[in-house]
Amino acid sequence: MVEFIIHGILWTLALYGLFEIIKTILYIVTCTNMKSDGIYMIIATKNQENKIEGFLRTILFRILYGKEEMVKDIMVVDLGSTDDTIKILHKMEEDYPYIKVTNWKEYKELMENINSN
């Protein structure tokens, strides 16, 4: 009887895991079109080398796994960091196509061009 209960619990957990994998695959295939219209997140940062990578990875995790599905791209604006923040941001920009890194002057020009159109 105990063996039957253990097998039942294991099968239940295995089926739950299978359904979660299928749900994740279907979501990634159908819902993650990061280049379409949507909401673009703008993050301004300065001298945050110890925190910026973890923060961005948290945001990316939420985007990829459906908590913030409306966010399409992340623009990170560096406000003149004097530490390794910009190096970390450029490395993450290479790894993830959703992240765009710019400085304050380029961001200001971009916003002026958008406002003038």
Image (cartoon, rainbow, N blue to C red):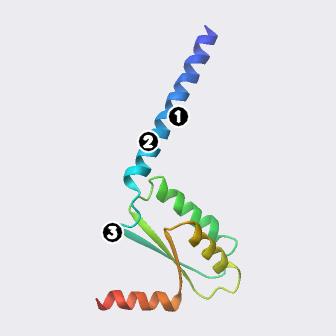
Quadrant (top left, top right, bottom left, bottom right) of the N terminus: top right
The residue singled out by tag 2 in the image is 23
Q: Is tag 3's residue or tag 2's residue first in the polypeptide sequence?
A: 2
Comes first in the chain, label 3 or label 1:
1
Q: Marks 1 and 2, Cα distance to the nearest angstrom?
A: 10 Å
* SS of the residue under disc 1: helix
* Disc 3/disc 1 C-alpha distance (Å): 33 Å
> In the picture shown, does residue 2 fall above or below 26?
above
| Residue wearing tag 1 | 17
Hey, what amino acid is under mark 1? Gly
Residue named by callout 3: 37
x and y percentages locating residue 38 in the rendered image? 35, 68
Determine crowd level at label 2: few under 14, some 14-19, many 20+ residues with C-alpha closer than 10 A: few
Vertical arrangement, residue 20 with respect to residue 111, above or below: above
Vertical arrangement, residue 108 with respect to residue 93, above or below:
below
CA gap between label 3 and label 2 equals 24 Å
Which residue shows up at 49% across the image and 40% down it? 21
